[in-house]
Image (tube, rainbow, N blue to C red):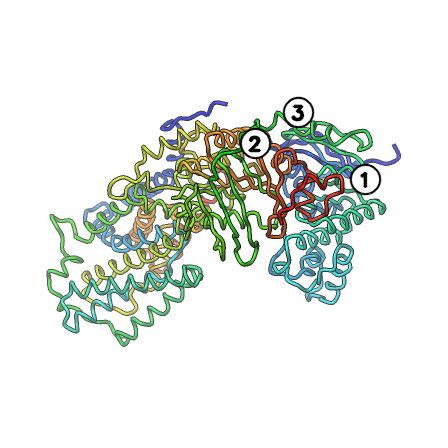
Amino acid sequence: MTDAPVLQIRNLSKAFGPVKALSGVELELRRGEVHALCGENGAGKSTLMNMIGGVLHPDEGEILIDGRPVTIASPAMAQKLGIALVHQEIALCQDATVAENICMAAINARRAPLMNYSEVYAQAEKAMNQLAPIPVRTKVADLSISSQQLVEIAKALTLDCKVLILDEPTAALTETEAQRLFSIVRGLKARGISVIYISHRMAEIFSLCDRVTVFRDGRYVATETIASTSPDDVVRKMVGREITQLYPDKLPVDAVSGRTLLSVKGLSDGSRFANVDLDLKAGEILGIGGLIGAGRSEIAQTICGLRQASTGSVALDGKPLTIRSYADAVQAGLVYLSEDRKGSGVFLDLSIAANVSALDLGKLTGRFGLLDRRAEADQAASLAKRLGVRMAGIDAPVSTLSGGNQQKVAIAKQLSVSPKVIIMDEPTRGIDVGAKVEIHRLLRDLANQGVGILVISSELPELIGLCDRVLVVREGAIAGELGAGELDEEAIIMLASGVQPAPAHQGQVNHVA
Amino acid sequence: MHADIKATGPSRSSFARLASMREAGLIVIILALCIAMSFASPHFLTWGNFRAMLMSFSIEGIVVVGMTILLIVGGIDLSVGSVVCFSMVVSGALFLMGLDPWTASLIGIAVSALIGAVMGFFVTVVGLNHFITSLAAMVIVRGLCLVITKGTPLSLFTLPPGFKAIGQGSFQGIPYVIIIFVVVVTIFDFLLRRATAFRKVFYTGSNEKAAQFSGIKTNQVKFWVTVLCATLSGVAGVIYMARFGAATPTFGAGMELNIIAAAVIGGASLKGGSGTIFGAILGIALLSVVTSSLILLDISVYWQDMIKGCILLAAVSADHFLHAKKS
């Protein structure tokens, strides 16, 4: 061995309370290597990256850099060791300029009492121009999500790093921006920098990376060279079983003839999206795909009155709906599950019972405006049982539950009003595979009972495996529809990114807009 | 796959235990202090002293109720001391102009509610935060008190005895002030735990976004809780007027700090979402026992604020560590 690996992870474990996020995982990163890390959401990839980046600290195991064991106590320490981490979620100071964000570490390390803005701008421009010509004096808050993502990457590039970690860097990028990023990654590799590349997109991994390591449910599964494996093989290792078993049976093709439950015509909000039409039939699960920031959540929130519509109409079960507020939508039988579970889905410090009843207190209210606590407890207990929530009891605060069980509580809240249509925004984001399967089964059961289900998801396998039909949103408009038999990752990505389909696929894609 | 559901099982008691730990702890501290004081001073363990202590925090206790509910919704009101004074001054001035004291008091309470509504407007419609809005209100309302009284106390010794009895009389040896306090506390403690309307206060304070995503009109909730807090301050102002037979334009300055301290010692979180009336009342009782003890022990009044501040810091630190351990 002439070259010790730049970074080595040995037998690393981490638990959050009772939930084991990682147990005994391994990873070896060679110099100048682009190493893909794959695993489903909840497999522990981000947890591992946060430990390498000094954000979290391992319970067990060791991290070696250039063959020497190190303790990475803080993000500043990680930077000193030559590790740069680009988070999946954008963590920029929104009120500062692009340049101030890019040079944050340098400004922090600076000893001089005054800022040297000309130097900051010059450095920032140098880093930024490698990626995209974003003016460095603009405020980050004024940039689109994809531009912000590029600023994050530029920020990491200014650090003199040996190891660059990219956590789903292309999730919010357009195809051209992604291509530019790939050429930069190849350039870094040529300079001897090692890259850990986290992505769900097999095509990217197989064109960019040298080796791939797979995690499943917080455990190490395998490391393979890209040359000796295939996308199918990697996916099989990620899910640990044939992918067809992961999702419940779909509606038989000839059975999609239920009445139209939700009909949206010409919906616009005047800023983020325009002229959206969609029809949801009883018994079907309709998926909505597209890039982050394409306007999917905004469309869903506008349908159910959480945002103001400027034009367009919504009809539920044949009856036109006048929705002034979300409470009206709930009353009519239309509910929305937020994508941001902790931020707007559940009340973490309140009990499970209080969470479940939040959507309709009216029906639990007895005489004199007092809450019927027995009815509340019964409702929570029966819904928790139906959804299989693992908990100490319905009076435990939601913060004591695992992510998957928190999500089940949020869904129980939606079910408490016996809705006709449920809109689920990223229903399985960040939850473990087991809970995910249960939630998918539940959604299919609900659909079979005649509930209309609209699922917004950024996970292509979820859209493909779960939904009967998928609408793809691009830049605030429906870019196309994919029916049963047309659903595959490539078709969705093409519609989502606006790339013209390859001639061979032309026939499969119905362009609506 | 089986969910482990025990509707009234151990978790209920363990969660309740955690919540009531604060209250149990406060009761123990108060009792310990009382026992220690009974050895230190022969005057401490007398009905007279207890009555005086109860009287001293009864009226403030009504304000504490409003403040606690406002803290639960995630707000705060720095103007309570000024509003108490304003209610007192307006009622007093109207009485001196010839209105009967009962009508004058109702108007005093109504204008207090109006101040709450104006603050609520700035918080919900304009979108300012509670801290700044109520800081401005505190100064403006205090200014109004000085304008109305031209800076000199209003002497109200002509108030009819029937009205003065609210603050000075008693029923079977129990002062009306204490009776009113107990009634207000009992009603609001019950409502806060049981009424649907108040459940929305917890939802809003715990996670405003999630509350909106549950169809709760959080701005309405915040508006009405702001009005409620100011209204209860107005009620307290009228009782003070009956008790003192005077309306001083500087009365209640600094009261807000005592009130907020009491609520926080009692377990209300400045981040919203948690707090109980019972805990807050124990908080103000503790502060009152400490004050009374310091007086009986002949310790200079100049020490009082310092010691109260230390108690606040200790209570909040204890809470912080408790929560840090939990997560």
Which residue does the image show at 20% across and 68% down from the upper left?
Answer: B92
Viewer-nearest of discs 3 and 2: 3
Which comes before the other along the chain, label 3 or label 2?
Answer: 3
Locate residue A295 relative to residue B274 in the image: left or right: right
Mark 2 is on which residue type? Lys
How would you rate the neighbour count of disc 2 (Cα within 10 Å): few for under 14, some for 14-19, many for 20 or more? many
Which comes before the other along the chain, label 1 or label 2?
Answer: 1
- So how many labels did they put on this image? 3
Residue B306 in the image: state x and y as whole percent: 40, 56
Q: Distance between the residues labelled 1 and 2?
A: 33 Å
How would you rate the neighbour count of disc 1 (Cα within 10 Å): few for under 14, some for 14-19, many for 20 or more? many
Residue B308 in the image: state x and y as whole percent: 38, 53
Q: Residue A242 carries which label?
A: 3
Judging by the rendered image, the residue that carries numbered circle 2 is A436
Mark 1 is on which residue type? Glu
Quadrant occupied by the N terminus of chain A: top right
Viewer-nearest of discs 1 and 3: 3
Tell me, yes or no, if residue B292 can be seen here: yes
Under circle 1, the secondary element is loop
Subunit under mark 3: A
Mark 3 is on which residue type? Glu
Judging by the rendered image, the residue that carries numbered circle 1 is A33
Under circle 3, the secondary element is loop
Whether labels 1 and 3 share one chain: yes
Subunit under mark 1: A
